Amino acid sequence: MKAGTFIQSTAMLDDSFFEKAVIFITGYDEKGVTGFVINKIFPRRFSDLVEFRNDCPFPMYEGGPVDTENLFFLHQRPDLIEGGTPVGHGVYLGGDFRQAVSHMNSGSVTENDLRLFIGYCGWDLGQLESEIEEGSWLILENGTVFGNFSQQNI
């Protein structure tokens, strides 16, 4: 397991937050694993948030059940958004949020370039590996953060 890995929940996680979830792993170290659910659209748009009401109605995703009071983002545009951390597949975690919002508003980045998340997923060291062994998750061979997951039969 490493950053850049995709996992998909199995039927063992039905009737939970993770039902039919595809997660992109963005961090894997001695503390544990972090990632984002990339296939669950949040019911509100970016401009529905009070502090961003004058910005574009960009879609947001339910990134996970941890830290749901904060926004996070992944993107593929290090040429436009400085300071992101590479996590695999040409994807960057975070960076200069003001630049991201400016490019969202101007249309120079689209949802094919950037995803906004409410919350994230996190596991303690060894926890996700145990869940994979018990059959709760499948490791996907291929995937894309910004594409369509219909080929994964979700």
Image (cartoon, rainbow, N blue to C red):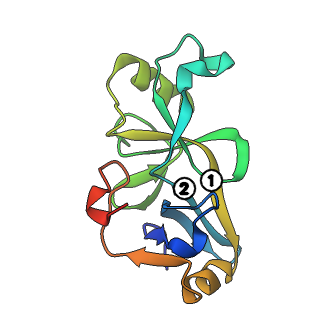
From this view, report whether residue 145 is shown above or below residue 52. Answer: below
- Circle 1: element type: loop
Q: Give the residue at mark 1.
A: 64
The alpha-carbon separation of the residues under discs 1 and 2 comes to 6 Å
Q: Quadrant of residue 4?
A: bottom left
Which quadrant, please, contains the C terminus?
bottom left
Residue 68 locus on image (x, y percent): 71, 44
| Disc 2 residue crowd, few under 14, some 14–19, many 20+, Cα 10 Å | many
* Three-letter amino acid code of the residue under disc 1: Gly
Q: Nearer the viewer, residue 151 or 122?
A: 151
From this view, report whether residue 20 is shown above or below residue 117. Answer: below
Tell whether label 2 touches label 1 (CB within 8 Å): yes
Residue 54 locus on image (x, y percent): 55, 10
Residue 99 locus on image (x, y percent): 48, 28
Q: Which residue is drawn at 35% across and 41% down?
A: 77
Residue 22's label in the rendered image is none
Residue 122 locus on image (x, y percent): 67, 64
Q: Give the residue at mark 2.
A: 36
| Disc 1 residue crowd, few under 14, some 14–19, many 20+, Cα 10 Å | many
Q: In this view, does 83 lie to the left or right of 104?
A: right
Q: Which of 45 and 14 is in front in this view?
A: 14
* Three-letter amino acid code of the residue under disc 2: Phe
